Amino acid sequence: MIVNEPVDTQVSLAHLHVRKIAPADLKEVLAKGLDDFMAMPTYSIFLIVIYPVVGLILLRLTFGYALLPIVFPLIAGFALLGPFAAIGLYEMSRRREQRLVASWNALDVFQMHRIRSIAILGAVLMGVFLAWLSVAMLIYENIFGNWTPATFTEFVLQVFTTPAGYTLIIAGCGAGFLFAVVAFAISVVSFPLLVDRDAGVALAVLTSIRAVTANPVTMALWGLIVVSALAVGFLPFLIGLSIVLPVLGHSTWHLYRKVVER
């Protein structure tokens, strides 16, 4: 029998046990995420569709040639906000897991007693995103100065066929990797934890970091899976994210269940 029940809000603030998982467990995590999406595709797409829509708007606003150098950092950095964008998906997976009614009530996760912690952590991710954009522009200016490409083709040729372009790629990817590691470590299980329990921001972030350090190889592989999936989703003008992100969002919930003991 399917019933509505309140979210479990009781959690010991002293300690949350973090399990060690194997890379093979990620196959089960993805399978469950895909199963959730197939069971609730309409709700899932609705809850995440704002993500690619906003991405397209940002691309349109920055596609002047003067701002062309920031397009790639913008797309890459926008992925840092994915864990926050998937909040509703975590709640839907939680409800389905507990045989609760899966409906638009997934947005109930934004109740007053949860919204503060979720908003604070979301602001932290936004801060990481903005810091990444600032660093990316500094790197570009240090290498290319005030040069503005006259055409998209000219910009691509400068980046991929010149020593300065190779330096930009190496430095930009290196800096981006560091920002991605920080964002991943603090958010990989923290948002699902905040949806599941009244844990508080500090405990959620600490648990997420502990989950990464306890499972470095598995979490690195999960990060690679996420990046690869997002790259595929970005290709058809970001529209593919409407499928990729719900699957990743639901899968992240099941990853959280695997790593953090109930």
Image: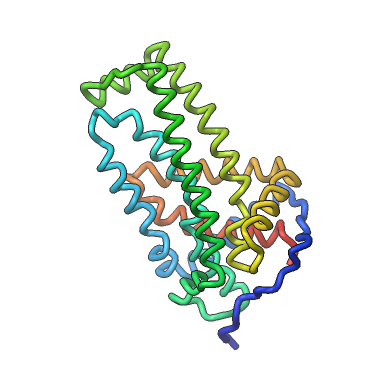
Q: Quadrant of the N terminus?
A: bottom right
List the single residue furthest toward the top: 163
Coordinates of residue 81 in the picture (x, y in percent): 47, 49
Residue at image location 30% in from the left, 22% down from the top: 155
Coordinates of residue 74 in the picture (x, y in percent): 39, 38
Query: Does residue 242 sit above or below 165 in this rendering?
Result: below
Residue at image location 64% in from the left, 41% down from the top: 220
Query: Does residue 130 sit above or below 100 in this rendering?
Result: above
- Along the viewing direction, whichever of 125 and 3 lies nearer the viewer: 125
Residue at image location 38% in from the left, 34% down from the top: 72
- Whether residue 28 appears in this view of the structure is no
Coordinates of residue 57 in the picture (x, y in percent): 28, 48
Coordinates of residue 216 in the picture (x, y in percent): 71, 41
Residue 70: image quadrant is top left
Q: Is residue 204 left or right of residue 116?
A: right
Q: Is residue 170 left or right of residue 165?
A: right
Query: Does residue 81 sit above or below 147 in this rendering?
Result: below
Q: Quadrant of the C terminus?
A: bottom right
Q: Is residue 55 left or right of residue 128?
A: left
All told, the count of numbered labels is 0
- The figure's colour scheme reads rainbow
- Whether residue 47 appears in this view of the structure is yes
Residue at image location 30% in from the left, 47% down from the top: 56
List the single residue furthest toward the left: 150
